[in-house]
Amino acid sequence: MKGRILAVEDDVHIAKLLRMELSHEGYEIEVLGDGKEALKYLEKELPDLLILDVMLPGIDGFSVLEEIREYVSTDLPVIMLTARGEVKDRVRGLKSGADDYLPKPFAIEELLARIEAILRRKGKGERISYHEITLDLQSREATLGGEELQLSKTEFDLLAVLLSNAGIVMSKDRLLEKVWGSEDWGNPNVVEVYINYLRKKLGKSGGIIKTVRGSGYVVR
């Protein structure tokens, strides 16, 4: 078993899809239809990851997440599903404590990749390693091939996001949200500038940061 996942989703078709696909991938999956049920469940059991829909009957996903962060767990990994694509909603979810979000409709392959990335980060705790690169998230030290790698705060944060989401294409807007805090921080071209900084500092290893034309960047 890869891990235990709780999904809170009132759409019966999506709920069925999640149960079928996640079970097929080796996860133990529980699916509930509303936020109150989820909070009662979490009083007794804590899964490895929570998939939480925003639009739920009774109490919405944002309120559920705020309750979880205040009374249940500050570090339970949470992926929010939302049919509302507005920036303010996505930012609210992230500020409420979501680890990631996925707009509907979504490809199940992308959801699976994000689940794996989050659980991989959780398992590694305070250290991220990829090929010759290692980042210590607590001391904020970076090494390349065992040698110290000098990175600015922004370079470190950007590289940490890319490495911890290896295999997932990250758009400029998502990188702005995760590294700078908001899509509205400034021109998305600032991401391209810092990607170039990282590639230069990483030397030959900089080739792991791939440009996906029209979509963003991916480490692979």
Image: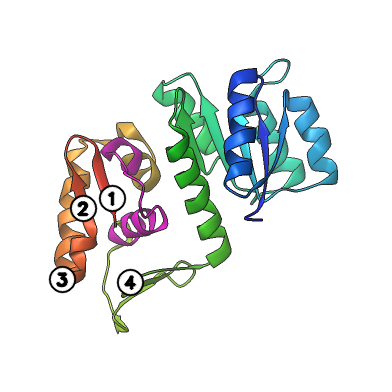
Secondary structure beneath dot 1 equals strand
The segment highlighted magenta reads 155-175
Report how far apart the C-alphas of labels 4 and 3 lie in the structure: 13 Å
Name which residue lies at 18% across and 34% down: 214
Q: Is residue 48 left or right of residue 100?
A: right
Instruction: Quickly name the residue at label 4.
Output: 131
Report how far apart the C-alphas of labels 1 and 2 lie in the structure: 5 Å
Q: Position of residue 162 (x, y in %)?
A: 34, 54
Secondary structure beneath dot 4 equals loop
Q: Position of residue 100 (x, y in %)?
A: 49, 40
- Which of pointers 4 and 3 indicates the residue nearer the eye? 4
133, above or below 58, in the image: below
Q: Are marks 2 and 4 in contact (CB under 8 Å)?
A: no
Q: Would you say residue 11 is visible in this rendering?
A: no
Q: Would you say residue 187 is visible in this rendering?
A: yes
Amino acid at circle 3: Gly
